[in-house]
């Protein structure tokens, strides 16, 4: 391999990022070597600033630059309904929706026995604490619909029901704009079960 | 959009990298926010070190940490044959092949009239200068096999032939329309064995 050692090192570090394979790491590295110093400074500065100023909201655990975050401190939002998501990215996706104006809670992951991630590794206890000390009367569970997300939803629902709080799950069905031909059997089966009158 | 402003800024900067779309930029950004400070320091440090220590060899224009680079200063290599490539990445790809032990020249791109990249924007004059002042008697053109690379090859071949130097092109073991950077070693090796005079 005829590459200068510092370039190899940069490729190695970039390859550690998620979704970046060896070829992509090379491509990014050679691009970075061609960027002007201003551009590179802006990139590095944006990373360092984001790291320094971003904190976890102590109420919902969403990433924020204030504590409590602007969702938790927004008194115009419905204070009796909470949407539970796995990650901050999921929260962003749900927050784009106009017909939900309640609160949020970020679990920080999903249960995954194979990866040794159990109930103590995600914030189930913090969620319970919050529910006990608030006037929330409905929890919408919006974990992923893969096996880990499903398992997490079932586990959380069981614990919450003991508090006497209503628990709901995002509806299953066909994605809007989708093609029935390409939908999998499980999704179609759920869509039939959840059919609505026209 | 409910994201802290510095996180938005980081996503914007990362989105400027080649092959990184909006979703990928988000994924990388959230990953970076979760990385420990040591990891982030290593990543940034590797980028800055690579930028600071990497120079262009004044003979072949390959990226290097020495001038002349270790290929140009290696007297055991065949000194009468030179392989012309578009980029340093292409040079790395060719250098993995065992049946080529000659020298290199990196053009720094390919002709592309649509992007207003003409003969003065790549190092054709530097290549001619080098050929005139050396004992090179064969030039292997290893530009990409897409239309820009082909055009570049034809243009360079014409000028070189006027010097009376033999010009060859990598054999079509290469898939047409492909990119040398992504070709596998066996394919490149076949292409070198089957090179043809232009």
Image (spheres, coloured by chain):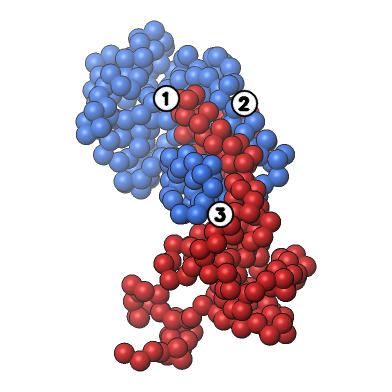
Chain colours: A red, B blue
Residue ID for mark 3: A70
Marks 2/3 same chain: no
Residue A138, image x and y in percent?
59, 78
- Residue A106 visible within the image: yes
Image position of A103 with respect to A184: above or below: above
Q: Is mark 3 on a helix, strand or loop?
A: loop
* Residue at x 27% of width, y 27% of height: B117
Specify few, some or many for label 1: CA neighbours under 10 Å numbering under 14, 14-19, or 20 or more: many
Is tag 1's residue or tag 2's residue first in the polypeptide sequence?
A: 2
* Residue at x 49% of width, y 24% of height: A37
Residue A86 picture quarter = bottom right
Residue A166, image x and y in percent?
61, 83
Of A198 and A41, nearer the camera is: A198
Specify few, some or many for label 2: CA neighbours under 10 Å numbering under 14, 14-19, or 20 or more: some
Question: Given the current orientation, which residue lies at the most extreme left position?
Answer: B113
Residue ID for mark 1: B106
Q: What element carries label 1?
A: strand
Image position of A109 with respect to B7: above or below: below
Which chain contains the residue that carries disc 2?
Answer: B
Residue ID for mark 2: B49
Marks 1/2 same chain: yes
Q: What element carries label 2?
A: helix
Tag shown at residue B65: none
Residue A84 picture quarter = bottom right
> Which numbered disc, 2 or 3, marks the residue closer to the eye?
3
Image quadrant for the N terminus of chain A? top right
Q: In this view, does A162 lie to the left or right of B83?
A: right
Distance between mark 2 and mark 3 Cα atoms: 39 Å
Residue A157, image x and y in percent?
66, 81
């Amino acid at each position: 391999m005829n590459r200068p050692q510092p370039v190899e090192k940069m490729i190695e570090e970039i390859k550690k990022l998620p979704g970046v394979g060896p070829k992509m790491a090379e491509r990014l590295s050679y691009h970075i070597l061609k960027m002007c110093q201003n551009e590179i400074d802006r990139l590095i500065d944006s990373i360092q600033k984001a790291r320094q100023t971003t904190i976890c909201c102590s109420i919902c655990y969403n990433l924020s630059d204030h504590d409590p975050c602007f969702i938790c401190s927004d008194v115009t939002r419905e204070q009796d309904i909470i949407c539970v998501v796995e990650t901050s990215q999921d929260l962003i996706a749900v927050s784009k929706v106009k017909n939900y104006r309640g609160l949020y809670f970020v679990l920080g992951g999903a249960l995954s026995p194979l990866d040794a991630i159990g109930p103590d590794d995600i914030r189930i206890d913090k969620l319970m604490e919050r529910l006990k000390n608030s006037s929330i009367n409905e929890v919408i569970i919006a974990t992923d619909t893969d096996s880990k997300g499903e398992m997490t939803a079932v586990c959380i629902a069981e614990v919450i029901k003991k508090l006497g709080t209503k628990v709901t799950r995002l509806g299953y069905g066909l994605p809007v704009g989708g093609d029935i031909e390409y939908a999998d059997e499980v999704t179609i089966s759920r869509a039939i079960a959840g059919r609505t009158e026209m």
